């Protein structure tokens, strides 16, 4: 297959073996989407064909857009190595067909035209064309992979000693699968493949790491009303540039109350670790910083999941029971109800403890006094 827009080597470099789809097949998917969009088609669906927008202005605005993205990649007038085309703000979404107990999805690609539906548009400085692959699930929860599409198109440059910036996020979704509140983000930087770093995060999550980001993902994995997202945001930065970017990005999330980072970003975060005597000098390597953050977490174990997510989940009875009764040594909901039932029959507390196999008398007494498990009815 000849590629007009996509550089398969760039797809392999950026996505590699850590994505849930073969990189050459992925290259073909992106190429087809760009070719269709360049002709003004906004929706392509397996077995049904391709369609232009019901709003003619959208299709008209998209005609020739892939050619303009390609021209921008090879332009010598770009202000920086990571400058992206900002003429139209839209996303390309590819969903691979999947059948679950609740629904079935066909394989389709479509455009989210933020430049037309301006209530959803990004800030001017963030305008770009992002490709989303909604393909995989992480332990039963949908996981989306995203990146600016120009990164895998022909002509996009790469620099020596490249650093990249990325985000992993969590969002609670409505019945149609759309996020219903602000997404919470973990901002990260690396010199390596960002999805390889994500695979390492997954290993840490499974091993019980208590970093804020890891605790949050572990808490929500397996829920069908949660969307986990990983987005490659920027590339081609030097160490100093990526530290400045991370500082700004983490500050923005912390100001919005949507951060999953344990410390400040960039050099401010490194200074914080040094002031806590967790590093030998104010500026260290990213590897040394990661080790220092693990030590910081051990000293601050109560750092947890954002209150905004917790408060909404807490309204869900199933989630509440999982939290209240899910930890080893806690009473189950049935045990709690049995304690109250036996107490109504005037059974001595020592006998109740024995009958329900509680840890001790004090645990039963706290239930009966209402000090614990009051949420369970």
Image (cartoon, rainbow, N blue to C red):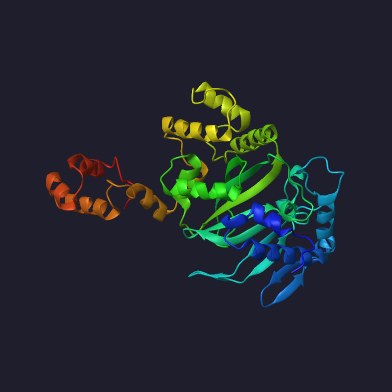
Tell me the residue at 77%/64% (across/down): 3
Q: In this rendering, does residue 280 appear at all?
A: yes
Report the quarter where the N terminus lies. Answer: bottom right
Tell me the residue at 59%/36% (across/down): 254
Residue 338 percent location from the top left of the image: 22, 54
Residue at the right extreme of this rendering: 77
Tell me: residue 318, above or below residue 200.
Answer: below
Tell me: residue 143, above or below residue 123.
Answer: below
Residue at the bottom extreme of this rendering: 47
For residue 367, side relative to residue 33 (left or right): left
Residue 278 percent location from the top left of the image: 49, 26
For residue 228, side relative to residue 219 (left or right): right
Tell me the residue at 85%/54% (across/down): 71
For residue 104, side relative to residue 37 (left or right): left
Tell me the residue at 44%/31% (across/down): 300
Residue 175 percent location from the top left of the image: 54, 62
Q: In this rendering, does residue 310 appear at all?
A: no
Residue 332 percent location from the top left of the image: 28, 52
Nearer to the camera, 209 or 23: 23
Where on the picture, by quarter, is residue 149?
A: bottom right
Where on the picture, by quarter, is residue 281?
A: top right
Q: How many marks?
A: 0
Tell me: residue 97, above or below residue 231.
Answer: below
Nearer to the camera, 279 or 297: 279
Nearer to the camera, 296 or 364: 296
Tell me: residue 67, above or below residue 276.
Answer: below
């Amino acid at each position: 297959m000849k590629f007009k827009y996509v550089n398969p080597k760039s797809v392999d470099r950026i996505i590699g073996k850590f994505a849930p789809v073969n990189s050459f097949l992925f290259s073909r998917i992106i190429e087809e989407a760009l070719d269709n969009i360049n002709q003004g088609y906004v929706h392509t669906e397996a077995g049904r064909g391709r369609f232009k927008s019901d709003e003619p202005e959208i299709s008209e605005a998209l005609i020739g857009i892939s050619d303009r993205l390609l021209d921008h990649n090879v332009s010598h007038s770009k202000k920086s190595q990571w400058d992206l085309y900002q003429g139209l703000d839209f996303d390309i979404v590819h969903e691979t067909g999947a059948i679950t107990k609740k629904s079935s999805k066909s394989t389709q690609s479509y455009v989210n035209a933020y430049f037309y539906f301006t209530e959803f548009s990004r800030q001017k400085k963030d305008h770009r064309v992002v490709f989303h692959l909604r393909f995989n699930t992480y332990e039963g929860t949908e996981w989306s992979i995203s990146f600016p599409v120009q990164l895998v198109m022909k002509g996009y440059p790469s620099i020596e000693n490249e650093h990249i910036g990325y985000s992993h996020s969590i969002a609670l979704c409505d019945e149609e699968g759309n996020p219903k509140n602000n997404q919470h983000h973990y901002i990260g930087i690396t010199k390596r493949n960002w999805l390889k770093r994500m695979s390492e995060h997954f290993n840490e999550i499974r091993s019980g790491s208590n970093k804020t980001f890891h605790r949050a993902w572990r808490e929500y994995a397996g829920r069908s009303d949660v969307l986990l997202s990983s987005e490659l945001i920027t590339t081609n930065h030097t160490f100093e540039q990526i530290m400045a970017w991370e500082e700004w990005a983490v500050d923005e999330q912390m100001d919005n109350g949507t951060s999953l980072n344990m410390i400040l970003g960039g050099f401010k975060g490194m200074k914080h670790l040094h002031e806590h005597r967790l590093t030998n000098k104010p500026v260290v390597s990213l590897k040394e910083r990661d080790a220092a953050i693990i030590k910081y977490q051990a000293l601050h174990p109560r750092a947890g999941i954002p209150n905004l997510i917790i408060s909404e989940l807490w309204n869900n009875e199933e989630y509440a029971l999982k939290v209240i009764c899910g930890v080893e040594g806690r009473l189950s909901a049935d045990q709690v109800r049995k304690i109250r039932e036996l107490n109504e029959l005037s059974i001595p507390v020592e006998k109740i403890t024995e009958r329900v196999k509680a840890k001790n008398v004090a645990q039963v007494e706290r239930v009966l006094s209402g000090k614990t498990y009051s949420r369970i009815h």
